[in-house]
Image: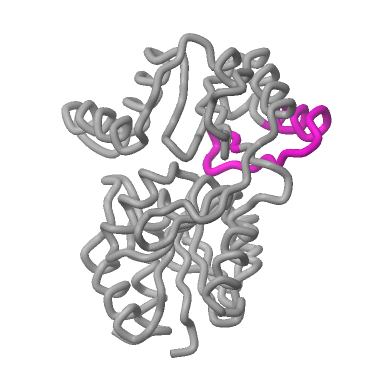
Amino acid sequence: MQYRLIALDVDGTLFCGRHRVSPRTLAALTVARRRGAITVIATGRTPHSALRVSREIGGGPVICCNGAGLLDEEGRLIHHRSIPTEPLLRVLKLGRQADLLVHGYTPEGVVLDQPMAHLIRAYAWLRAGGAALQAAVGVARLWGANQTRLVPRLTQWAASPHRPPVLKLTLFGDPARLPDVADAIRREVPGVEVTSSGPDNLEVTAAGVSKGSGLAALGERLGIPPEATIAFGDSDNDLTMLRYAGLGVAMGNAPPHVKAAADRVAPPCAEDGVACVLEEVCGG
């Protein structure tokens, strides 16, 4: 088979409103693996959450925290790049000044303060895709899957020399205000990358870290070149891996600039866009 590595974003690509992979997509991924392809989850999620999704689709290595972490098939962290303390603290300061909610992503899970505000935000996000009870249960599962840890003050925790490495920061807030915050971070904080996985967030990693860099590192480990790689995604944080892969596929629900960066556009996630492409290039 021409394509030996299939990189898959999660939210908006594999997961739609119900936050699960469709039976048709699972079947297409199974066929691709039987024909020699390796499937890899490439996500902004934590190692724990990303590994859970990987096992749901049948396993494989994992690129997590937008490329800052790389897991083998057994779930061991085999490579990571963390944000240095000084830029970490400067990004947190800018986030607080803009009244944004912030998650810190570590190899151990998510760290946050202001738990009630985060609960309300997570509930509203999940409520959009299901009933009230399902959303409440979903919040509990989300926090459990991410090994969520509460701290009194995130800035104080980040300054501690005893904390684990921070692979990524996610800042949540009003979509209208986030572009200005992103510009401020790029202008005032050297040594970091700023991207987004949706209109309500910014995602910050160490300089040079991206899903594309993670996919390149994995391909080198596996001996699989870019031209034998397919990547699927729908957001800004997918752009680097869409450009890296021999076949970069944007979902039909992606914004126009993401579609423009891809080699082809699949049907939307809700119409099993991943499965449609895989059935064509890998056989059904």
Q: Nearer the viewer, residue 36 or 269?
A: 36
Query: In the displayed structure, would residue 55 be above or below residue 17?
Result: below
Q: Is residue 125 left or right of residue 92?
A: left
46 over 43 or under it: above or below? above
Where does the magenta region start and end?
A: 179-203
Is 181 colored magenta in this rendering? yes
Q: Is residue 242 visible?
A: no
Residue 21, horizontal then vertical, whole percent: 28, 57
What is the quadrant of residue 41 in the picture?
bottom left
Q: Residue at x 72, y 39 (%)?
A: 192
Residue sticking out furthest to the top? 152
Q: Is residue 282 magenta?
A: no
Residue in the picture at 53% in, 31% down? 164
In the orientation shown, which residue stands out farthest toward the left? 133
Percent of width and height locating residue 258: 61, 57
141 versus 197 height, above or below: above
Residue 67, visible in the rendered structure: yes
122 over 242 or under it: above or below: above
| Coloring scheme used | one colour
Q: Nearer the viewer, residue 42 or 262?
A: 42
Q: How many marks?
A: 0
- Residue at (43%, 90%) from the top-left corner? 1
At 36% from the left and 52% from the top, the residue drawn is: 51
- Residue 50: x and y in percent read 39, 49
Name the image quarter holding the C terminus: bottom left
Expressed as whole percent of the image width and height from the top left, the position of residue 271 reads 33, 62
Residue extending farthest to the front is: 162
